[in-house]
Image: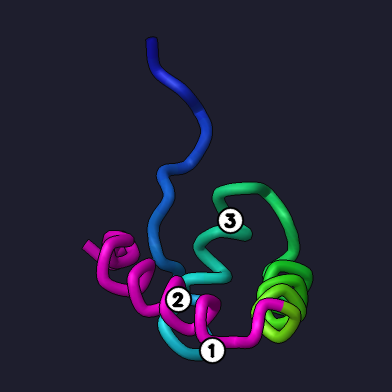
Amino acid sequence: MISNQPRLRRSRDRMIAGVCAGIAEWLGWDPTVVRILYVAISILSAAFPGILAYLVLWIVMPRPVDDSA
């Protein structure tokens, strides 16, 4: 069974590493909303878990697809 939903990967529309924008593309949301939610949740959880989660996602999520080829 083939799904039309995009794969979870980092985005070229990035502020730091494209993690939040990649999650937004995967969910079909606006990247700004995901970034604001991520920062708010990180601040409310004492910031460290949010920073650690971002670094792990940066390493684990595949790079964006090169569309120029």
Mark 2 belongs to which amino acid? Tyr
Nearer to me, 18 or 68: 18
Q: Residues within 10 Å of mark 3 (few under 14, many from 20)?
A: many
Q: Considering the image in quadrants, where does the C terminus appear?
A: bottom left
The Cα–Cα distance between marks 2 and 1, rounded to whole angstroms, is 13 Å
Foreground: disc 2 or disc 3:
2
Quickly name the residue at label 3: 25
Residue at 69%, 82% in the rendered image: 39
Q: CA distance from mark 3 to mark 1?
A: 14 Å
Q: Quadrant of the N terminus?
A: top left
Left or right: 37, with 10 as reference point: right
- Give the mark nearer the N terminus: 3 vs 1: 1
Image coordinates for residue 10, horizontal then vertical, percent: 40, 66
Question: In percent of the image, x 39 and y 57: which residue is there?
Answer: 9
Q: Amino acid at mark 3?
A: Glu
Q: How is the image coloured?
A: rainbow
Between the residue at mark 2 and the residue at mark 3, the CA separation in whole angstroms equals 16 Å
Corner quadrant of residue 59? bottom left
Q: Are marks 3 and 1 in contact (CB under 8 Å)?
A: no
Q: Is residue 3 above or below residue 17?
A: above
Task: Kindly identify which residue carries mark 2.
Answer: 54
Q: Is residue 68 left or right of residue 23?
A: left
- SS for callout 1: loop
